[in-house]
Image (cartoon, helix red, strand yellow):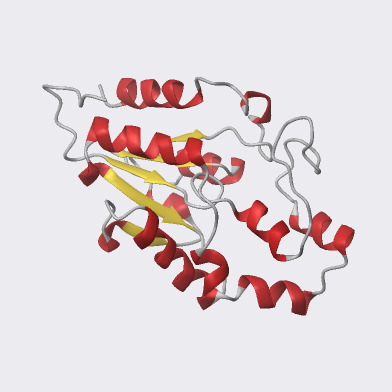
């Protein structure tokens, strides 16, 4: 992909969520407990469009608080999350289009150090183009919202909060189609990445 000429993208910030966009949290969680998982519209084991999956997963598979905590507090769990090829392809498209200086990571590590350590290890291994000073580990992503910023996330609430931040210069956010958000009907659309990239270019024109 050729980077667009005559465009100055030096002041923009495109924040990518990590797990759910580029890293597969739910596939890894199912694998950790030996539970089959198929992320297709026809075989998806949870209600389409529902963000609240963990309670259902734990209840259905008899996973206790202790068992769950042992897995998600382990840095190795996060460091070895599988790559989601479509989300990773969008990231690379954006690097090629806007330059790596415009790309940032905004990911929620929750309340445990294991996730913080493991997520950083995953990013170092899989996205070395994004330097550590451009990685934000935080729960409230709307704090990053500015006129020059865009968030790409798989969580409906994060997208809404980013665009409705109490700020004089609100940012733009795009919901990446996943089976657990309100854009689930577009999950299998072959042009998702091209559509989002086109919207980004239009936004920064």
Q: Quadrant of the N terminus?
A: top left
Q: Residue at x 39, y 54 (%)?
A: 126
Where's residue 52, x and y in %? Answer: 74, 51
Does residue 110 appear in the picture of this structure? no
Where's residue 44, x and y in %? Answer: 77, 39
Where's residue 96, x and y in %? Answer: 25, 33
Viewed as shown, does residue 131 lie left or right of 51? left
Residue 81 occupies quadrant? bottom right
Residue 160 occupies quadrant? top right
Above or below, 67 against 142 in this view is below
Where's residue 118, x and y in %? Answer: 48, 69
Does residue 108 appear in the picture of this structure? yes
Above or below, 112 against 201 in this view is below
Viewed as shown, does residue 145 lie left or right of 22? left
The residue lying toward the viewer, choosing from 101 and 83, is 83
The residue lying toward the viewer, choosing from 161 and 39, is 39
Q: Residue at x 41, y 34 (%)?
A: 90
Residue 102 occupies quadrant? top left
Q: Residue at x 54, y 53 (%)?
A: 82
Q: Quadrant of the C terminus?
A: top left
Q: Please count the marks in the image.
A: 0
């Amino acid at each position: 992909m050729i980077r667009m000429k005559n465009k100055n993208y030096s002041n923009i910030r495109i924040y990518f969520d990590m797990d759910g966009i580029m890293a597969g949290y739910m596939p890894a969680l199912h694998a950790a407990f030996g539970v089959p998982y198929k992320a297709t519209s026809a075989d998806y084991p949870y209600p389409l469009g529902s963000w609240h999956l963990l309670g259902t997963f734990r209840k259905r598979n008899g996973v206790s608080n202790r068992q769950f905590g042992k897995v998600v507090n382990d840095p190795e769990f996060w460091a070895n999350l599988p790559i989601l090829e479509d989300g990773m392809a969008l990231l690379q498209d954006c690097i090629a289009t806007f330059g790596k200086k415009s790309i940032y990571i905004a990911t929620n590590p929750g309340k445990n150090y294991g996730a913080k350590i493991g997520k950083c290890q995953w990013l170092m291994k899989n996205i070395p183009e994004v330097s550590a000073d451009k990685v934000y580990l935080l729960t409230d992503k709307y704090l990053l919202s500015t006129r020059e910023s865009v968030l790409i996330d798989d969580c409906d609430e994060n997208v809404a909060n980013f665009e409705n931040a109490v700020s004089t210069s609100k940012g733009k956010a795009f919901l990446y189609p996943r089976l657990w958000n309100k854009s689930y009907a577009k999950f299998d659309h072959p042009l998702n990445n091209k559509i989002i990239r086109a919207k980004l270019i239009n936004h920064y024109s």
